[in-house]
Image (tube, rainbow, N blue to C red):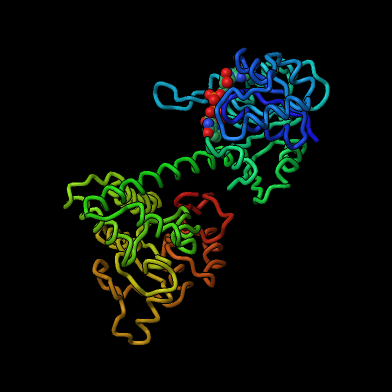
Amino acid sequence: MARISVFGIGYVGVVSAACLAKDGHDVITVDVDPGKIASINKGLSPIVENGLDELIHDAVAAGKLIATDDVQFAIDNTDVSFICVGTPSAPDGSVGLKYVKSVCEGIGAALATKDAFHSVVIRSTIVPGSTEETCIPALEGSSGKVAGKGFGVGYYPEFLRESTAIEDYYAPGLIVFGSMDEPTAKILTDLNTGLNCKIHTVDLRTAEMVKYTSNTWRAVKVTFANEIGNIAKASGLDGQTVMEILCSDEKIAMSSHFMRPGFAFGGSCLPKDVRALRYLARSTGTEAHLLHAVIDANEAQIRRAEAMVKKSGAKNIGFVGISFKPGTDDLRESPLAELAARLIKDGVGVNIYDPYVYQAYASGNSAFGRGNDVIPDLENRMIPKLEDMIDGSDAILVGNFYSEAIDQLENAASTLPVLDLTRMKRDMVSQGQYEGICW
Ligand SMILES: NC(=O)c1ccc[n+]([C@@H]2O[C@H](COP(=O)([O-])OP(=O)(O)OC[C@H]3O[C@@H](n4cnc5c(N)ncnc54)[C@H](O)[C@@H]3O)[C@@H](O)[C@H]2O)c1
C-alpha cells in the first residue's frame, strides 16, 4: 500500500483521494480552503457526488484519510503527491496555470528538506509542454533538486465524469501516463494494475495531449449529436433514436476506424453524404456549423498536402496511390486525385504507382479510371513498377499504404524527399528528407 498526498480537494482530488483510501492506501489531502479541510476531517464530503459521502465517512473513520493545509507535513508523510488543483481558462482562453505553478512551488520547498525520494504527479488538465515548462522549473527552483533524479515526475490525467466519478474511477475507459523516472512509473503502474483497462505509458507531452484530445472529441461528439438532432427535428425525425441506432454499431461507427490522423477523407460516400446532410440542414433552415467545419477542415487537409509538395520544390512527383484508399481502384472524390490534379494544373509532373488502379488498366477493365474526372491522361501517368517511378521522380508522395512498397519507399527517403500522408511505418516521424503530414 502506498502513502499518497492529494493536492486540491476539488472533484478530481476528493474522488481519487476517497477511492485510494478505500483501496487501503494512506491518503493526506491538502487544500488552501479551510472549509474543505474541516469537512473532510469531520468525515463529510465537501462536494456532492454519488456515493462519496459514505466513502469519505468510512475512510476517515478508518484513519486512512485526513486533510490539512500543511504542505511540509503532507510531503514528509507520503511518497507520492497528486496535483489536482484547478486549471480554469485565462482571460484569453489559454490554460490557467497559476494554481498548478503555486502548488508546485510549495511542494518543491517541502522537498528541499526531505531526503527520501518523492514523486510528484500532475493530474490537472494542462496543455502539452506545461509539465516540462511550468511544473518542473517551479519544482526544481524551490527544491534545489533535479527532476527525474532528486525527485520523480509524472503526468497522469484523470478522465472521470462528474456524477459517475466513483464508477469511472473503478472502471476507467482510458489509463495513460508519462513519467520521467522508474519509481514514478512503478507507483502509477501498481496503482492501476488491478483495473480492467490497458495502461498506456507514454512521454509527458503525449499524456497531456491525450487528455485534451479526449475532451475535445467528447465536445465534437456532443456538437455532432446536437447537429443531427437539429436537422432531424426539422425533418420531422427523432435525432435521439437515430443516434442510438448509430451508437449500436460498435463494429464500424464507434470503433477506431477513421480515428487515425492522416489525409483527407474522400471516396464515394463521406464527402457527398456530408454535403447532402449540410444541404438538408440548409433547406430546413437549420444551422450546421460542425458540418461546414468538417468540409472546410477536409479541404484544408488537401491544401496542407499541396503545401508540402510545393515546399519540397519537386518538379516531378511520384504518387504512391491515387484511389481514395488502398484495396480499391475507385477514384471517386479521391483526395489524392484532387491533389494530383491541382499539382498538374500548376505545372508539376505527376506519375502514379497504384497497383489496384493499374490492375484495372492492365486487365483492360472498361471501368479503368472509374470516378476520375480531374486527372488528365491518367493512363499515361500510370507506372507499373515502383522502382521506375522512384528513379523518374524528384519527390515521392505516399498517399496509400501498400505493404509490398514500404521497404523501397523507406530506402528512397535517403535519396529524395518522401512526403507521407498515410504513415507507412508507425514509428516514422518527420526527419531529414522524410516528412509526414501530421507526425
Ligand atoms: N471536474 C472534472 O470532472 C474533471 C475531470 C477530469 C479532470 N479535471 C481537471 O482536474 C483539475 C481539477 O479540477 P476540479 O474540477 O477537481 O477542480 P476544483 O476547482 O473543483 O478544485 C480545485 C481545488 O484546488 C484547490 N487549490 C487551489 N490552489 C491550491 C494550492 N496551492 N494547494 C492546494 N489546493 C489548492 C482549490 O481550493 C480547490 O479546492 C482541472 O485541471 C480539471 O480540468 C476535472
Instruction: Tell me if 293 is positioned left or right of 168 in this view.
Output: left
Task: Please state, as top left, top right, bottom left or bottom right, where the N terminus lies in the image.
Answer: top right
Q: Which of the 4 image quadrants contains residue 272? A: bottom left
Is residue 310 among the parts visible in the rendering? no
Image coords of residue 131 (percent x, y)? 60, 30
Instruction: Tell me if 223 is positioned left or right of 405 in this view.
Output: left
Q: Which of the 4 image quadrants contains residue 101? A: top right
Image coords of residue 193 (percent x, y)? 73, 46
Total residue callouts: 0
The front one of 48 and 7 is 48
Instruction: Tell me if 376 is positioned left or right of 14 in this view.
Output: left
- Residue at image location 57% in from the left, 29% down from the top: 11
Image coords of residue 5 (percent x, y)? 71, 25
Q: Is residue 300 above or below residue 392?
A: above
Q: Is residue 419 above or below residue 289?
A: below
- Residue at image location 32% in from the left, 59% down from the top: 339
- Residue at image location 49% in from the left, 64% down from the top: 251
Ligand 1 found in image quarter: top right
- Residue at image location 25% in from the left, 66% down from the top: 374
Residue occupying the far right of the picture: 115
The front one of 138 and 21 is 21
Image coords of residue 246 (percent x, y)? 40, 59
The front one of 185 and 214 is 214
Q: Is residue 425 above or below residue 37?
A: below
Instruction: Tell me if 25 is positioned left or right of 402 in this view.
Output: right
Is residue 314 among the parts visible in the rendering? yes
